[in-house]
Image (tube, helix red, strand yellow):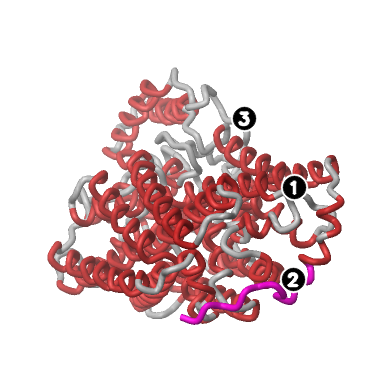
Amino acid sequence: MKNSVTAFLLALSLGGFAHAAEPAKAPSVQQAPSAVTASAQQSTPPAAAMVVPAGAAKSAAPAKVKTNKAITLSMFALIILSTLGVVVWAAKKTQTAADYYTAGGGISGLQNGWAITGDVVSAASFLGMSGLISLYGIDGFMYSTGPILGFVTILLLMAEPLRNAGKYTMGDILCFRASAKPVRAAAAISTVAVSTFYLLAQMVGAGKLMQLLLDIPYKAAVIGVGTLLIVYVVFGGMKATTWVQIIKAALLLTAAVLLSLLVAIKSGMNPLRFFADVVNNAAIQDHVRMGVLKHPLPEAGLDYGKRFLQPGLFLKNPLDQVSLGLAWVLGAAGLPHIMMRFFTVPNAREARKSIRIAVFLMGAFFILTTFLGFGAAIHITPQKIAAMDKGGNMATLLLAQVMGGGEGSIGGDLFLAFVCAVAFATILAVVSGLVLACSAAIAHDIYVNIIKDGKANQREQVVTARVTSLVVGALAIWMGIAAEKENIVALVALAFAVAASGNFPVIILSLFWRKFNTAGIVSGIVVGTIAAIGLVLVSPNMTYPKKIAADARKIVDTLEKKQAAGEALAEKDQKALEKARTDYAKNKDGKSIMGLDAPLFPLKNPGIVSIPLGFLAAIIGCLAFRDRRAEDMFDEIYVRQNTGIGIANAIDH
């Protein structure tokens, strides 16, 4: 036990990049459900294949999370009415394009730091990260560490230059010394691509949350949430979005602190006892053996409880961990809706201050997700979590109910309703920021500056922005319905990979390389974005039926061999055998969505390949098509990004 705790704490101190090799005998895990993105859901076997040991029988999964609807609806109504009040207030102050996109630059560093936290700590963080930890242990923590490192990168390199170089969008930053129309078009396409993956994550989270908690159809839930976010963005703009994000961040941290404290109290406020509870939990041991490693029979000398505290259950390849880390770190610096937040503060000093505050707040939250995830594994069991939702997205909600006193208790119902309302507010806040970023890219970059050549008046710009937000919101509803089966944290990971591969290389080179030009920007964005998405389509993230059938065949052969030797199968082994036979028959002749029998690209996250490709394409494009004007203007942009000369004064709100 001491060794496992030491290894775990070391992994935490290294930011989750430590890797422990999986025992050689453990067969690989193959994702069963169909999907397009890296998904914890894909790596989690169907609930029927997860066997709850006798000692954990009380954890048998219900059909859905049972809530007190009166209390839950009251909490939801309070959140909605409060935020709608903010929208009404903000709408009265939104008159110009600057008001709509950046709140007139009148947000303080403190406010912006809280708002950035609200923008980044999304449904994927609150629901998906803790869920991954509850199902895959330390590997889930990998998804928590990257954003913090990414924001340190922004703080050290990019916060001040971005604030001083741009106006509303990423296109503004990139086109200062490049040809405006092709650059704005490429930047807008990239912004929409990144925001789409992120947006899908939030809409799926919202739909599942409302479906499971309020017992309404998934489609109706997505439509309701989408309608509400359209109201927020269309009428309130950036000012309303900012304050909704601030309120949500405060509520989220409060919920995480309370829930983590209750989990810690259960272990006597003793971290060693907490990790001992993880290692010695029979349900966790059985989940690792049958649900993850797919061992039909226990292997001698392998401690399945300790294995839960070692890397490699979800990200088995060390390169996968490095690739994911690169995508998180550099992707955070390339997210369009985060870049927009730097334009909401009056000067570069406030931009740096907002990043410092955001890093502190997010660091605190992501540490707490570790306690939430492991706490859910201990007190709920991975079997029940996976049976409720294969991606683990309900782990935090189930934990809140148990920590509050259990199903049917006043405390359990109140705490569950509060956490549900916070998760709902989280989704609304993040989606509002994403829709606003998409709207700005389409309305400001495409319509105003490409179609209208920058000649649209203020009224026309605001109307265009609001109409675009309405259209983007409607598309978000449609996509959310179509993406019902996706795991939310993995969708966000893909968004980070696209941002790191297409956006980050061109932003950093544009700010700091004299020779960088239009050709470099366009080629870097296009190649990086296409590479990231294309590699995912031929990666292990996709479903490969023949691999599923091969894994099922191994289980069938092992258990049938045991039967042939005259041994009677236990009930759980008999169920596993029946399930394996069904899986084999169903998948033995199938192919992936790309028509493949096996992955062409071995990693779940493409960052380790797609990010260098983005940089390489940007550099080659730049050198192949030299632009003397871009080089001559570098001194001007360099002075501007370091001094703020030429930036309009903030509008006083």
User: Which stretch appears magenta?
Assistant: 638-653
Q: Nearer the viewer, residue 247 or 649?
A: 649
Foreground disc of the pair 1, 3: 1
Foreground disc of the pair 3, 2: 2
Residue 167 lies within the magenta run: no
Three-letter code, disc 2: Arg
Looking at this view, name the residue that lies furthest to the top: 589
Distance of label 3 from label 2 (alpha carbons):
46 Å
Residue at 57 percent across and 35 percent down: it is: 539
Residue at 23 percent across and 71 percent down: it is: 78
Tell which circle, 3 or 2, labels the residue nearer the N-terminal end.
3
Residue 307, horizontal then vertical, whole percent? 51, 54
Q: Nearer the viewer, residue 111 or 583?
A: 111
Q: Is residue 611 left or right of residue 226?
A: right
Q: Are marks 1 and 3 in contact (CB under 8 Å)?
A: no
Q: Nearer the viewer, residue 298 or 348?
A: 348
Three-letter code, disc 3: Leu
Residue 469, horizontal then vertical, whole percent? 41, 53
Check residue 600 in the rendering and tell me which mark sits there, or answer none.
3
Check residue 518 in the rendering and tell me which mark sits there, or answer none.
1
Distance of label 1 from label 2 (alpha carbons):
19 Å
Residue 642 lies within the magenta run: yes
Check residue 640 in the rendering and tell me which mark sits there, or answer none.
2
Q: Is residue 176 left or right of residue 557?
A: right
